[in-house]
Amino acid sequence: METSHTTSTVDRKAILKGVRSVVVKIGTNALSGADGHLDNQLIGHFAEQVAGLVARGIQVTMVSSGAIGAGITELGLPGRPKELPLLQASASVGQSILMRLFAAAFKPHGMHVGQILITRGDFEHRGRYLNLRNCIQALQKCKAIPIVNENDSVAVAEIKFGDNDLIAAQVTNLLRADLLILLTVVDGLLDASGQTIAVVQDVEDASGNVDSKKKSSHGTGGMGSKLFAAGTVKTAGEPVMIANGKRPNVIRDLLDGVETGTLILPASRKLSSRSRWIGLTARTLGTLIVDDGAAKALRANKSLLASGIVEIKGEFEAGDAVLIMDKNGVTVARGLTNYTHVEITKIRGHKSGEFAQLLDMETYYDEVIHRDDLVVET
Ligand code: GLU
């Protein structure tokens, strides 16, 4: 059991000391009053806290839910629609309301807001991924708070993330932000007896201790999705905090090391930007099954050679991301392949000296995946 209710061993202040860039995700219910409608006062206090961080020299990127809820209210719908087009319409109407409220809330602090609506493809396509980062950085230079949400008016099942916890985690990894804060309407991760878990060392272990399906009325995520999202940020080497967005000054307190909410500790290694994309974001289009020798070499940070590949699944081009598994189906690594699935079928089990003849090519890569393009599972 590595989750902990005690705080004696974890010095929050020390962990948060160097934080210069934060992603803050706020859920629909944390922005809504008891009547379920977006609440100006809550939004105002939230903006005040974000402005406070910026004044301390911390860059803030927001991920905000609330569009669908606002649209449902504005259109006078009886509840969350089941039909997808009506949900899309609610998001379309609600998103502009949400942004108007944020713009008004940040204005007294001399700050602008910039809306960024994304779909899953914006993260999976490396060019779009980097464009997204450029846009966020440009907004921050203009003293505008980037506010990200899913483009729910077009994002249907195949192109949808589905919840903003995951989007916030991906944005954290994209920016290499130092901290992700997930604000909800409970005090953090709660254990079976309703106690806040102060510190999580092992996300998988913690998943077994929380009610992962429990979620709030308008939101789509639950504690399960929060933990999953937190796991990807942890793997990248950054901490995550889950706390109650309705607690006054919660963001300031979290940054000051006040004991509130749940702190998910970062992994010991920090992944580079490129490794974050390869290991945590890029969509894998195929799987390479490798023998025990190759699996061992990969775990020792060596490149993947054709001689160790025993089976190829899926269809992919050179440059695509693929999964590498051992013969027992355990994921060993993810990486960007130098060869297509057709080419690997021809060279698998062979040494690179034979590639020219097997592939009928004059020049070739010695490695199927170079170690610089690999991220090994920990
Ligand atoms: N994108 C949705 C909205 O703005 C919320 C999704 C979520 O709560 O995770 O309403």
Image (tube, grey):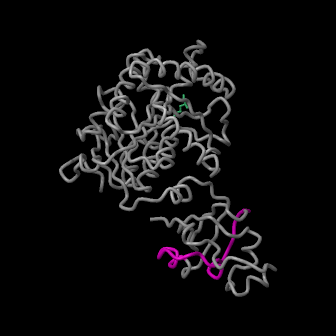
Task: Please state which of residues 50 and 258 is positioned toward the viewer in this rendering.
Answer: 50
Question: For the magenta stretch, what is the residue range?
Answer: 295-316
Residue, far left: 8
Q: Position of residue 146 (x, y in %)?
A: 50, 33
Please report the residue visible at 30 percent of the width from the left and 31 percent of the height from the top. 250
The quadrant where residue 314 appears: bottom right
Residue, far right: 360
Residue, far top: 76
Would you place residue 25 above or below residue 362 in this image? above
Q: Is residue 41 magenta?
A: no
Please report the residue visible at 72 percent of the width from the left and 74 percent of the height from the top. 344
Quadrant of image for the N terminus: bottom left
Please report the residue visible at 77 percent of the width from the left and 70 percent of the height from the top. 342
Would you place residue 50 above or below residue 285 in this image? above
Position of 349 with respect to 170 (left or right) is: right
Q: Position of residue 81 (x, y in %)?
A: 62, 23
Position of 10 with respect to 360 (left or right) is: left
Quadrant of image for the C terminus: bottom left
